[in-house]
């Protein structure tokens, strides 16, 4: 059924057409032909009866047929109608034929408006719709008299599947005080649900949905059901032997665990999806998240020599998968975050260790917990074990924290579009009529003129020959007043200012006004986050030999790798391959990693810091904060890194299926120098 009415209700609700036709009998001559013509004009369809008589307030109609002579929609050998004081209709052994569940019955709303509080009694009805057959429909359909309430049926019917029938009980329910249609069944063949689908790529073809106990209210489902040996076909693949409990509510569906096989490979899934548009509409591909998640599972199914697949949901528009495969070089474990950039509740941003460019480092998971992220990965290469300064560009919340270098970086705008490129900084600091080129931001030691902000850290290290001018803003944009001038031959406290290298021979005095302007080139309109890394692995759908690759000697070294990738349909993937664990995952060379990404239909991709830094985190179902999802290679423990790329969600925390939260991470200990 379209709109707010559940499609299963069409089985019964369409019978109300008889009552609408009979209503015109009270306002028309008794003659059979006049009755049929008046009803046909109202219903927009042919109507015929063999007789229609009135006695003591009851209309008696024989051999009613609605629809064309060649293809009747409803046939009933006998119907009785009482119109006052409240309309009551009784249909004996009606046959209802619906060509398409999705087409709807326009006369239903008119009947509900004309006869509020009406009821329709069905005795031994049969229904054929979308290739499904129902028999023994027996019960009463009641209209609530409100356009905001669906009609409710109290009774039974049976789904016919070959020689077997499957009883279904329908009754009224009031979940959360709302009038709802409850549906109870011991078992329904899963293949029957394919009739409710349009062109979804996932279709149930075998098995049963058991212990069905759901209520349909306001276009949403609430209740439970259980998958029993269910098979879904998915192009050339299949999910089969699926078992698990389902929980419906608040426009979503969740599960503590569904287990089965993807083709012949062990498969399990857990979590919730909350964008279901209407009852059973998600089976028709109406759920954007389910389409996205099914797409990822299908792409994983195309991988060679799979050994196992796990999937769970993280937040709307965001899902996590981990799969194992065997290669000629040894086992591999691949971790994937699929990201729907059209999901309005998702946003990207970055984080930096201890909120400073110069720090003691911080774990990716700790940065994620501290900033409230729902998923993410480690970021740029950095000065490991010393200053932890990232080597490349970093932009956070739309503000540049660290300037770019001659190496690939990625920039993400407010619409979650990604640009992979080599960026640089352009600008000038004008002192006393002399323009000094600004070549960096929050970089030390200084080359020419470098902008320093409080995000740099707590102390500027000694750099003999460098002059540091502390600045304060003025009322004019890009104009600053020099509050002090210091020789950096000794360390200095960090503040907003400009550092001039020895080669500039600058002459600047306290109280002087400096014009400062700079920008990132090429510019990205609406940029909100950026992070350095490299190399570019894929460009225009093919392997790219990046001439500015960091650590070029690592190109053909098999170890942990991580990348952000864009697919041809603009979906984004964060992919991390574990390594240095010969018994579990041996890692990949850069060209091998590019090949893997291309198999996912990736058009462009850039790597981030690899090796022991590779860390993927996400909020697992039941957790309130991110935890590590892959196995880092430094003795299976996280490395302290400089920065990270994260996703954040404004959607409510999933709550359909309470799950035990993951163990609380151990308190951090500082790394040994």
Image (cartoon, rainbow, N blue to C red):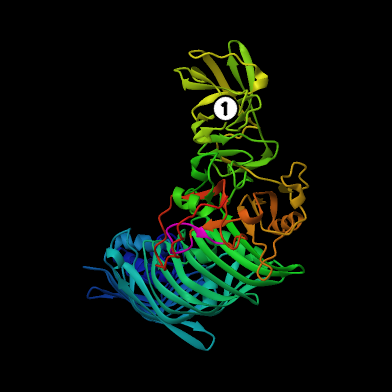
Residue 650 in the image: state x and y as whole percent.
Answer: 43, 49
Q: In this rendering, does residue 284 appear at all?
A: yes
The percent position of residue 182, horizontal first and vertical second, equals 35, 73
Please state if 444 lies on the left or on the right of 398 as rendered. right
| 569 in relation to 464, above or below | below
Q: In what quadrant of the picture does the N terminus appear?
A: bottom left
| Magenta-span inclusion, residue 607 | no
Q: From this viewpoint, is residue 105 visible?
A: no
Tell me: residue 128, above or below residue 588. below
Residue range corresponding to the magenta coloring: 620-629
Q: Is residue 138 depicted above or below 515 in this figure?
A: below
State the image coordinates of residue 517 (x, y, percent, origin top left): 57, 22
Farthest top residue in view:
433
The residue drawn where x is 56% and y is 48% is: 645
Residue 495 lies left or right of residue 551; in this view the side is left
- Residue beneath disc 1: 451
Q: What is the quadrant of residue 122 in the picture?
A: bottom left
């Amino acid at each position: 059924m379209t709109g707010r009415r559940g499609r299963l209700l069409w089985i019964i609700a369409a019978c109300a057409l008889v009552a609408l036709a009979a209503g015109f009998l009270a306002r028309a001559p008794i003659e059979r032909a006049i009755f049929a013509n008046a009803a046909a004009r109202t219903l927009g369809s042919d109507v015929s009866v063999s007789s229609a008589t009135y006695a003591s307030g009851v209309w008696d109609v024989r051999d009613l047929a609605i629809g064309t002579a060649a293809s009747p929609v409803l046939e009933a050998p006998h119907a009785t109608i009482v119109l006052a004081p409240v309309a009551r209709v009784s249909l004996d052994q009606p046959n209802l034929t619906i060509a398409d569940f999705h087409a709807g019955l326009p006369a239903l709303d008119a009947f509900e408006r004309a006869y509020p509080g009406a009821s329709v009694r069905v005795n031994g009805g049969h229904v054929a719709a979308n290739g499904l057959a129902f028999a023994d429909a027996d019960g009463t359909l009641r209209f609530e008299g409100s356009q905001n309430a669906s009609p409710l049926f109290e009774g039974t019917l049976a789904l016919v599947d070959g020689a077997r029938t499957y009883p279904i009980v329908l009754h009224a329910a009031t979940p959360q005080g709302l009038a709802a249609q409850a549906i109870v069944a011991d078992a329904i063949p899963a293949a029957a649900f394919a009739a409710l689908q349009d062109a979804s790529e996932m279709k149930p073809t075998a098995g049963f949905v058991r212990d069905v106990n759901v209520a349909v209210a306001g276009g949403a489902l609430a209740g439970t059901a259980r998958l029993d040996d269910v098979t879904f076909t998915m192009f050339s693949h299949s999910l089969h032997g699926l078992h698990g409990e389902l929980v419906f509510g608040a426009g979503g569906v969740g599960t503590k665990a569904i287990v089965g096989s993807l083709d012949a490979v062990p498969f399990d899934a857990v979590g919730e999806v909350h964008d279901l548009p209407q009852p059973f509409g998600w089976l028709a591909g109406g759920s954007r998240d389910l389409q996205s998640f099914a797409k990822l599972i299908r792409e994983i199914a195309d991988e060679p020599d799979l050994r196992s697949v796990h999937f769970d949901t993280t937040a709307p528009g965001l899902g996590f998968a981990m799969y194992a495969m065997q290669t000629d070089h040894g086992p591999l474990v691949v971790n994937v975050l699929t990201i729907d950039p059209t999901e309005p509740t998702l946003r990207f941003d970055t984080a930096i260790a201890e909120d400073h460019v110069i720090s003691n480092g911080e774990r990716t998971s700790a940065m994620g917990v501290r900033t409230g992220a729902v998923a993410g990965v480690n970021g740029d290469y950095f000065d490991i074990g010393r200053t932890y300064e990232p080597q490349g560009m970093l932009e956070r919340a739309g503000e540049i924290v660290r300037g770019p270098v001659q190496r690939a970086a990625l920039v993400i705008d407010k619409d979650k579009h990604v640009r992979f490129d080599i960026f640089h900084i352009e600008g000038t600091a004008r002192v006393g009529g002399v323009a000094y080129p600004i070549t960096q931001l929050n970089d030390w030691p200084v080359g020419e003129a470098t902008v320093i902000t409080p995000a740099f850290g707590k102390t500027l290290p000694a750099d003999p020959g460098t002059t540091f001018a502390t600045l304060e803003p003025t009322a004019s944009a890009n104009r600053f007043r020099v509050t002090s001038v210091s020789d950096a031959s000794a360390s200095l406290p960090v503040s907003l200012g400009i550092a001039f290298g020895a080669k500039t021979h600058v002459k600047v005095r306290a109280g002087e006004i400096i014009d400062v302007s700079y920008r990132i080139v090429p510019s990205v309109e609406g940029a909100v986050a950026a992070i350095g890394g490299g190399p570019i692995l894929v460009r225009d759908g093919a392997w790219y030999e990046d001439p500015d690759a960091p650590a070029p000697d690592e190109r053909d070294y098999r170890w942990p790798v991580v990348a952000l990738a864009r697919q041809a349909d603009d979906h984004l993937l964060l992919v991390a391959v574990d390594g240095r664990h010969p018994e579990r995952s041996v890692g990949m060379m850069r060209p091998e990693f590019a090949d893997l990404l291309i198999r996912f239909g990736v058009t462009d991709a850039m790597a981030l810091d690899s090796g022991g830094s590779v860390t993927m985190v996400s909020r697992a179902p039941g957790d309130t904060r991110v935890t590590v999802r892959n196995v880092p290679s430094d003795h299976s423990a996280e490395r302290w890194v400089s920065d990270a790329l994260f996703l954040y969600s404004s959607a409510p925390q999933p709550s359909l299926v309470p799950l035990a939260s993951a163990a609380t991470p151990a308190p951090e200990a500082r790394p040994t120098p």
